[in-house]
Amino acid sequence: MGIIRKWSTSVEESIWKLSEMGSLASHKGLIGDAREGLFRETLVKYLPKTVDVGSGQIIDSNGSMSKQTDVIIARGDTLRIPLSKEVSVYPVEAVLAAIEIKSSFNKATLTDAVKNLKTISSLGFMVSVPDPRDDQQKEKEYLSEEDVNKLFPWKDVVYPSTYVYSFSSDFKAIDRKLANKILEVSLDLDMDLESFPSVIAFPGAVIIKNDGFLIKEDAIPFPWIIAYREETHPLYWILAHLTNRLSATSGGPGVPIISGRYRMETHLDPLPDDNWGIIRKDWKERLIKESNEQK
């Protein structure tokens, strides 16, 4: 076990104990505020001083805003609109990550968290990068979303990563029932799993999206979108993803580093390659096929 994993395990046990003290309050809002504060304090200790950790809302240049977000991690070299000591409005271009904190993990709280974080991905993101096409191509070609993704692969890197962390869970076992709840949330919200948070963590398990930051796609022998497994101290995987995320971008707003970056992710523990449950990319097609076969 590496030093980051050891530190994360120790810190997570500490915030669990401190959160128990917070639960002495009878008002659920106060309990939630206490736990969010503990989580933000942990991130402030771990993350570099070049980032700002707070909470609030995220806004784009058209005036569209996200829902209230429990934890926002933003670049320290860009503007924000402070409303209080810890609450601010952040331009989406300044935001690196957003985290929803829940007291308990179940289908209802997962739905609420995913729905809130979805409002971030719908914001418009403005970034200035060279267009690889010449002037003649620009005049003739209409770019579809697929074309944009091919021409500008940085889009997935600079958009805010999203996470969910819960202090407890209603799930007694980490099995196919958990996967089914994830699929139900996806169907209820009419939201592709590709748009789900990068890491969902709660005592007993971690759920990871296939975005290339933690698990290499070819590490699993068939196309997959979600992986899940038992995990005693899941906070580590949010910190690991954040470490990889920060290592993949430069200090400037919204521009990925090309060369010469510090490889901080080399200090992370290797991801376990066993005992993973998987949701395949073609899960909807397989579900429809199974349904038709049963008719």
Image (spheres, rainbow, N blue to C red):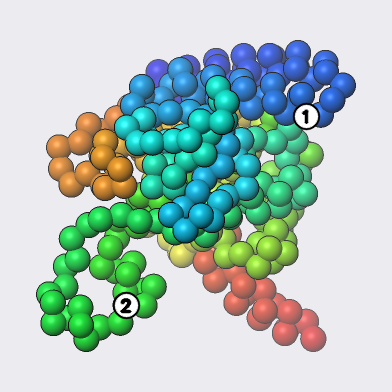
- Residue 33 sits in quarter: top right
Residue 50 figure quarter? top left
In the rendering, at what x and y percent does residue 102 appear?
70, 36
* Callout 1 crowding tier (Cα within 10 Å): few <14, some 14–19, many ≥20: few
Which residue: 62% across, 47% down? 67
Residue lying at the far right of the rendered structure: 26
Q: How many marks?
A: 2
Task: Tell me the tag on residue 226.
Answer: none
What amino acid is labelled 1 in the image? Gly
Residue 85 coordinates in the image, percent (x, y): 55, 22
Say which residue appears at 47% left-offset and 58% top-offset.
62
Which amino acid, by three-letter code, is at mark 2?
Answer: Leu
Residue in view at x 31 percent, y 47 percent: 254
- Residue 106 versus residue 219: which sits nearer the camera? 106
Q: Is residue 113 visible?
A: yes
Return the disc, 2 or 1, that comes first in the chain's sequence. Answer: 1
- Which residue is rendered at x = 61% and y = 64% of the image? 191
Q: Position of residue 192 (x, y in %)?
A: 57, 65
Can residue 241 be seen here?
A: no
Q: Is residue 30 above or below residue 145?
A: above
Instruction: Name which quarter of the figure residue 176 lies in.
Output: bottom right
Is residue 77 shown left or right of residue 33? left
Is there a contact, CB below 8 Å, between mark 2 and mark 1? no
User: Where 125 sits versus 54, above or below?
Assistant: below
Residue 107 is situated, as x and y percent measured from the top left of the image, at 76, 50
Where is mark 1, residue-wise?
29
The quarter of the picture where the C terminus appears is bottom right
Which residue, given by chain and number where applicable, does mark 2 sit on? 143
Secondary element under disc 1, as helix, strand or loop, is helix
Instruction: Say which quadrant the N terminus sits in.
Output: top left
Near mark 2 (Cα within 10 A), the count class, few <14, some 14-19 or many ≥20, is few
Identify the secondary structure beneath mark 2: loop
